[in-house]
Amino acid sequence: MSERQLPTIYPETQFYWDGAKAGKLLLQSCNACDKIYYPPRPFCPTCGSRDIAVTQASGKGTLHSFVISHLAAPGYEPPFTIAEVMLEEGVKMMTNIVDCPADPESLDLDMPLELTFEQRGDVAVPQFRPAKGGAA
Amino acid sequence: MTHAQIAIVGAAETTRMGKVPELSQTGLHADAALNAMADCGLTPADIDGIATGGHDVAEIAQYLGITPTWYDGTSVGGCSFITLVRHAAAAIAQGLCTTVLITHGESGRSNNRAHRPIFPSMQQQEFEAIYGPMVPPSRFTLPVMRKMKDDGLTIEQLAMVAVVQREWAAFHPRATARDPITVDDVLNSKMIAWPFRKLMCCLVSDGGGALILTSAERAKDFPTKPVYLRGLGGESAEGPMISQMADFTSSKAFRVSGKTAFETAGISHADVDHLMIYDAFAHLPVYGLEDLGFVGKGEGGAFIAEGNTRPGGKLPLNTNGGGLSYMHSGMYGMYALQEAVRQMRGISPAQVDGAKLSVVHGVGGMFSAAATVVMTTEDAW
């Protein structure tokens, strides 16, 4: 089985992957309109302002949607879960659900999730797993 | 009274469809183009505008021996050809050209499975592809569990989309899959990406199609029955990252595109005799019916399951069998247009009696883009 894909990192997104390596999920927020956003870019996608800041996500979220893929993907053993997490900060991102069977019985929509990281070579990839202890 | 400005005067699919290993992608474009020119009695020398999606438009012009004064290579996925009808109409109305050829060809099955008809998205690669959604069945389907929970869409309703479209495909000798299927057949077919089974996913085919547009005034001199465009159509885009779709239960691109098309055509939903909604997967007609406003939010699945869109139903939908049963080369939008033209000409094998107005709505990428056009048999309204 080939290796899992590594992200191609660009100058605008280097901070995100540096943050992940340090165990942080970094979002951005707009100083002009207060909106938090993802994925990274050096301006606010709501108002266009370049006056933005980096903000650390709490790492808490809920399962917004998912599929259980029975199709081949490099480095993945099907079936595996491709999911959407709704972060506590109100932005959504794609993730896998790790430390959890890829089985619809184990995946309830809106169940609490928590951040973890998967190491791929030098890159730490943000991932989510069912929250320990229940409430997000 | 408003008079039609633009008409479709030539329309054809490739000579063969489904499995066509003897033709390259370029060859499929050309086969469809030659068939469409023959349909309306033109030669390459008569074409001064050319458009295609997912392929270099200049190559198609050169291959066919066309010297264009206008071209368009908009490539946003399967709805590109619906978008291009709209763009071509605007170009003809502005006098940029007089006679536009829109071509599609795709050897999705035999010769070019690795073909990528849309520019790769940098952010999709960096923030989604790393999680393993390598192909449409595990990516386009991501919003559906959310829609099932929020809007009450059921797996049986999704299965019924495939069942009903197979009923339509049975009328078409050229459809790939024509044998009747049941909800149980769909729900027992191979698991692809939970909750999607194989029969809820589109076919993988070779084929192509082409259209020729000109002014409504000139259209009367052609041997074919003109199919007129009503209004300006619509288009919009939300973007290639499905994880960033604002609302997993409704497509913003669908809503914006549909609204523009209906408003500029000056029609209401009751005026629509025939409807095509691009169905790469079984959930798309459900989103389409709701986002175009044919039914209320959350009512699309039940509307189909109750039989409203099947043969004899009040809103004939995807009357060629759609991407699920007719064919799906990768960018299916051209085949939705072709079936709407056949319906407006009155020659579809699944002809809807007395159909005078057809709406064609398509998706590009995976909820990335959308386009809508309205066709009619009438030259004034």
Image (cartoon, rainbow, N blue to C red):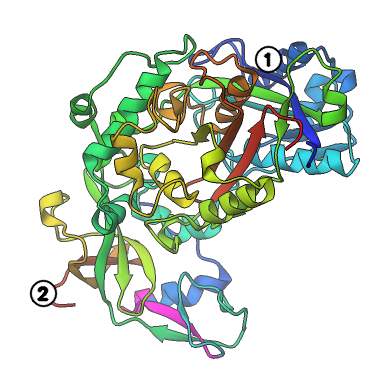
Q: Position of residue B183 (x, y in %)?
A: 22, 28
Looking at the image, is A55 positioned above or below residue A136? Answer: below
- Residue under pointer 2: A134
Q: Amino acid at mark 1?
A: Asp
Q: Quadrant of residue B302?
A: top left
Whether residue B287 is visible, yes or no, is yes
Q: Position of residue B157 (x, y in %)?
A: 26, 39
Q: Position of residue B52 (x, y in %)?
A: 70, 34
Task: Kindly identify which numbered label has been placed on residue A54.
Answer: none
- Name the residue located 59 percent from the left edge and 38 percent from the top edge: B117
Q: Quadrant of the C terminus of chain A?
A: bottom left
Q: Do the residues indicated by labels 1 and 2 lie within the same chain of the protein? A: no
Whether residue B135 is visible, yes or no, is no
Element type at marker 1?
A: helix
Left or right, residue B7 beside residue A15: right
A57 vs B100, nearest the viewer: B100
Q: Amino acid at mark 2?
A: Gly
- Name the residue located 77 percent from the left edge and 39 percent from the top edge: B89
B51 vs B61, nearest the viewer: B51
- Residue under pointer 1: B31
B309 vs A76, nearest the viewer: B309
Q: Based on the picture, tell me whether residue B304 belongs to the magenta stretch.
A: no
Real-space CA distance between mark 1 and mark 2, rounded to the nearest whole angstrom:
60 Å
> Residues in magenta?
A20-31
Left or right, residue B94 beside residue B168: right
